[in-house]
Image (cartoon, helix red, strand yellow):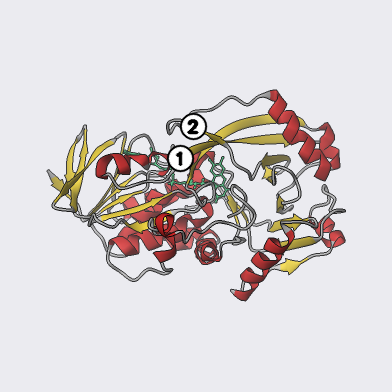
């Protein structure tokens, strides 16, 4: 039986980031076990949007720390060839009169109170930034210049390569079948390729985190929810210079961004289709659904009334009851650290989450407090529910 200082289950953006940070904080004998390939879980399905805008203030700090990594990725990893594929185009968000207005104002002011640059724009300035849209109904428009989007596959593989350079062993094609425990503590994992020993295991299994409940009996409130992403090509380009846009006024609370410098990537910020079992395979995308989203897009982007569907795909979120992750140790079982339940917004947090989970696993002080993200919040009722409603921005 081989022994390790720590074992990470899963090599998506979160597990790869954890592995890199474990090594960076001094762990020299780290093993990552990935059932398929690095990034091939749900990370490569990500829309990749990066912002610090959150209505749940706890997330703002994690997002801010993560943004500083995305903007300096190669230096941070000490790998001149690493790239996050970052497009720094800013983030525009607007709400009409109504229920979303106060939450938006509070969230923008919350960011400002944390020293983050956020501008309140009038309609004409917003149109200068995003000339393909109109803002006639917008009662409040916020703009975060230090925001944009990046490539989750590049980030996962970037972290993994840097981790390997620091001595981390990453095994792909290895499925963890069971967590091994003795007297209330973790002692290793069982796989078809053998048993690996460690007193520290970090599970970053996303929609497959239900394994934890099966292995330990500890409740894991996470479900798999499928969402659809469309790429539309209209007569006007959605260029890389144009900001990511969040439309709190649309029925689907749509988010959009440039796709390839010309097309528009668009998806809904609402609740998706719950799957009976975790499964990241592609789902059906009915043409009626495409038409419905197209109509919403055309309301905001008039020339997209003539847009065509360039491509479409589905991706699966690991959704918790309050749409925020569970981070940290689990009561009643020593040696297990978890990070799951990112509910469609984990990419932008991945550098910061990797750091804090590695710190927690190594017994170091964490950069941000993990207490708000504890599993116990679902029994105490101290939820991290976002103010725009489930599925939106959190
Ligand atoms: C359509 C879509 C759009 C999104 N858009 C955004 C966005 O714009 N911005 C943003 O911040 N976030 C976004 N997200 C969310 C973000 O992409 C995810 O939160 C993040 O990628 C999750 O990373 P992860 O490492 O937890 O999961 P994954 O990438 O799914 O990694 C988990 C890994 O664990 C492995 N695994 C599971 N069980 C086992 C086992 N027993 N043994 C071995 N390996 C195992 C799996 O194979 C998998 O590779 C989006 C997600 C989707 C689906």
Query: 362 above or below 228?
Result: below
74 relative to 256, above or below: below
Q: What element carries label 2?
A: loop
Tag 2 and tag 1, C-beta contact below 8 Å: yes
Callout 1 crowding tier (Cα within 10 Å): few <14, some 14–19, many ≥20? many
Left or right of 300 on screen, residue 71: left
The quarter of the displayed image where residue 332 is located: bottom left
- Apparent side of residue 23 relative to residue 188 in the rendered image (left or right): right
Residue drawn at (48%, 28%), measured in percent from left and top?
A: 281
The one of 65 and 337 positioned closer to us in this rendering: 337
Circle 1 SS class: strand
Residue 311 pos. (x, y %): 66, 30
Neighbour class for label 2 at 10 Å: few (<14), some, many (≥20)? few
Of the numbered discs 2 and 1, the one sitting upstream in the chain is 1
The answer to which image quadrant residue 173 occupies is top left
Q: Position of residue 203 (x, y in %)?
A: 33, 48
The spot of residue 298 in percent (x, y) is: 81, 39
Q: Position of residue 84 (x, y in %)?
A: 52, 52
Q: Is mark 1 within 8 Å of ligand 1?
A: no
Query: How many angstroms separate mark 2 from mark 1 (CA)?
Result: 7 Å
Residue 198 appears in view: no
Identify which residue is drawn at 53% across, 65% down: 68
Mark 2 within 8 Å of ligand 1, using the beta carbon: no
**Label placed on residue 393:** none
Q: Residue 275 carries which label?
A: 2
Quadrant into which the N terminus falls: top left
Q: Is residue 228 visible?
A: yes
Q: Mark 1 points at which residue?
A: 223
């Amino acid at each position: 039986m081989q022994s390790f200082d720590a074992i990470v289950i899963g090599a998506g953006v979160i597990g790869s980031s954890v592995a890199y940070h474990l090594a960076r904080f001094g762990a020299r004998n780290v093993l990552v076990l990935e059932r398929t390939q690095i990034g091939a879980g749900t990370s490569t399905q990500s829309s990749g949007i990066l912002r610090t805008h959150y209505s749940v203030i706890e997330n703002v700090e994690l997002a801010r720390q993560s943004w500083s990594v995305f903007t300096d990725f190669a230096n941070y990893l000490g790998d001149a060839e690493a790239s996050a594929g970052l497009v720094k185009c800013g983030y525009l968000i607007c709400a009409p009169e109504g229920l979303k207005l106060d939450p938006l104002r509070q969230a923008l002011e919350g960011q400002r109170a944390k020293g983050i640059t956020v501008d309140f724009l009038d309609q004409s300035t917003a149109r200068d930034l995003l000339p393909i849209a109109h803002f006639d109904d917008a009662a409040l428009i916020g703009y975060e210049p230090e925001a944009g989007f990046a490539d989750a596959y590049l980030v996962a593989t970037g972290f993994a390569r840097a981790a390997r350079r620091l001595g981390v062993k990453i095994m792909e094609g290895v499925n963890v079948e069971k967590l091994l425990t003795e007297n209330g503590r973790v002692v290793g994992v069982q796989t078809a390729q053998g048993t690996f020993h460690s007193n520290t295991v970090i599970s970053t299994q996303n929609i497959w985190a239900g394994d934890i409940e099966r292995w330990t009996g500890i409740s894991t409130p996470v479900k798999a929810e499928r969402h659809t992403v469309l790429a539309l090509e209209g007569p006007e380009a959605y260029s890389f210079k144009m900001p990511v846009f969040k439309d709190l006024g649309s029925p689907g609370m749509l988010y959009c961004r440039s796709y390839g410098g010309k097309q528009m990537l668009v998806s809904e910020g609402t609740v998706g289709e719950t799957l009976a079992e975790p499964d990241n395979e592609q789902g059906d995308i009915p043409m009626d659904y495409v038409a419905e989203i197209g109509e919403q897009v055309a309301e905001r982007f008039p020339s997209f009334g003539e847009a065509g569907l360039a491509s479409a795909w589905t991706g699966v979120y690991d959704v918790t009851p309050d749409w925020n992750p569970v981070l940290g140790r689990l009561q009643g079982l020593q040696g297990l650290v978890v990070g799951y339940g990112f509910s469609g917004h984990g990419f932008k947090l991945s550098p910061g989450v990797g750091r804090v989970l590695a710190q927690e696993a190594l017994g170091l002080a964490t950069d941000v407090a993990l207490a708000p993200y504890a599993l116990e919040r679902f029994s105490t009722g101290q939820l991290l529910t976002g103010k725009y409603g489930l599925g939106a921005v959190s």
